[in-house]
Image (cartoon, rainbow, N blue to C red):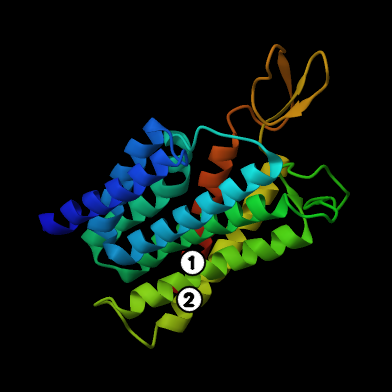
Amino acid sequence: MAIPFILGFILSFIVAFLAYKKHSLNQSGFITATLLGTVIYGFGTFVAWGSLILFFISSSLLTKLHEKKSKDSSSGRNYIQVLSNGLIAAIFSVLYYFLKNELLLIAAIISISSCNSDTWASEIGVLSKGKTYSILTFKEVEKGVSGGVSKLGTAASFFGALFIGTSFVLLYSVSPLFDITKILTYFTVITAGGFIGCLVDSYMGILLQAKYKGERTGTYTEKPFLENEKVILINGLAWITNDAVNFISGFVSTAVSMLVLII
């Protein structure tokens, strides 16, 4: 029983450490990613862990590409960002281990698909040269604003979910769980569920996520602070941050997808 957890820890530590050295994770993110990876590998097998790692690698590469294009820099994902993207998968992996219901493993991967879909949409969509529209009113909005969608971003969202769906098929095909009669259904639900999760994220972003503006300059921000300037809440709920939106949208898409499978 201990071997999967030991192997999961070693592999997760190596991946997280390399990400830390590349500044894709900060110190707290490195520790949290190692622990989450260990849990997901130990309880959810290499199928869930492999899906998580492919999400992490692809999203990190896209983030670096975005930073290079925009000349922005970051200190890497912190523990809150890691938890918002991986905690749901960890919870369902634990449930799968104890209840032995394969649908719970699929739920874990749907949550990963949702995170990947949203990340691809954000990191690729912001590079679009076309117009960005509100997903709620369809009026043109500033690029990068939560709830804003573009043709490029929407396409990236779908392919982000498709990437995890395809990755699952490859991982599942070489696992002891493999069942050819279920693989097409699982692939479809993982891909569709991930894409739906991104849409839910966009709606929550525009309706509920906290948005602020500077008292002096009127600068728009989704963070509760600006350098050398106080901010005031102009829309949304103060406790609904981007990380909270990611977590909730992932949970909603997973729950809806599970209902579809059960029914």
User: Disc 1 designates what residue?
Assistant: 164
What SS does tag 2 mark? Answer: helix
Q: Give the number of the disc on residue 180.
A: none
Say which label, 2 or 1, has the lower sequence index. Answer: 1
Whether residue 136 is visible here, answered yes or no, is: yes
User: Residue 43's x, y, as percent?
Assistant: 25, 57
| Mark 1 closeness class: few <14, some 14–19, many ≥20 residues within 10 Å | many
Q: How many marks?
A: 2
Front-most of 98 and 205?
205
Q: Horizontally, is 89 left or right of 67 in the view?
A: left
Name the image quarter holding residue 172: bottom left
> Residue flagged by tag 1: what amino acid is it?
Ile
Q: Is residue 182 above or below residue 64?
A: below
Q: Is residue 3 above or below residue 248?
A: below
User: Which residue is at a point 60% across and 63% down the rendered structure image?
Assistant: 195
User: Residue 226's x, y, as percent?
Assistant: 68, 19
Q: Give the number of the disc on residue 187.
A: 2
Of labels 2 and 1, the one closer to you: 1
Q: Is residue 114 above or below residue 190?
A: above
User: Which residue is at a point 72% across and 17% down the rendered structure image?
Assistant: 231
User: Residue 34's x, y, as percent?
Assistant: 31, 44
Q: CA distance from mark 2 to mark 1?
A: 9 Å
User: Which residue is at a point 35% across and 56% down the rendered structure image?
Assistant: 92
User: Residue 24's x, y, as percent?
Assistant: 47, 42
